[in-house]
Amino acid sequence: MENHEKTRYADSELQEFKDLIQEKLRMAHEELSSLASSLSNPNANGTDDTAGTYKTLEDGSATLEKESINQLAARQKKFIENLEAALIRIENKTYGICRETGKLIQKERLRAVPHATLSMEAKLKQS
């Protein structure tokens, strides 16, 4: 048996990653829409309090909450973009190839971070 290192993942392997990524995308979109709905409906927790002092406190924490929801939503959008880019790499059959070393990224890493473009080796060099 020839002992040459694989330069790309086989189509069956790519399909496995494609399924994984599509599932992650589906979940990410759900997460994003639930974040969006909590932003558009901030008083869902039903605190129609008449006490003025609490109102001011609530407004402050609501603003803070809105900011953190916005941050989560932005992170989620970025994640979705990364996953979509990974799907394109699957189509081009360049998926799972480290952009630094040109070697295959380990499957375990890709299963954990399906949009990874760096092998652990390259990532460790960066830090």
Image (cartoon, rainbow, N blue to C red):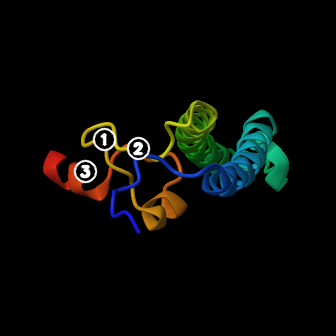
- Residue displayed at 61% across by 57% down: 13
Q: Which residue matches tag 1?
A: 102
* 3D distance between C-alphas at marks 2 and 3: 13 Å
Which residue corresponds to the image point at 73% horizontal and 48% vertical from the top-left? 22
Question: Which quadrant of the figure has residue 81?
Answer: top right
Residue of label 2? 97
* Residue 6, numbered circle: none
Q: Is residue 11 left or right of residue 101?
A: right
Neighbours of disc 3 within 10 Å: few (<14), some (14-19), many (20+): few
Q: Nearer the viewer, residue 114 or 104?
A: 104
* Vertical comparison of 88 with 14: above or below: above
Query: Seen in the image, is 12 located left or right of residue 30?
Result: left
For the residues carrying marks 2 and 3, which lies nearer the camera in this image? 2
Q: Residues within 10 Å of mark 1 (few under 14, many from 20)?
A: some
Quick check: 59 left or right of 68? right
Q: CA distance from mark 1 to mark 2?
A: 6 Å
Taking the spot 70% from the left edge, 46% from the top edge, the residue there is 25
Foreground: 45 or 57? 45
| Rendered location of residue 26, percent (x, y) | 77, 48
Identify which amino acid the numbered label 1 is placed on: Gly
Q: Is residue 78 visible?
A: yes
Name the element at disc 2.
Answer: loop
Residue type, mark 2 in image: Ile
Q: Amino acid at mark 3?
A: Lys
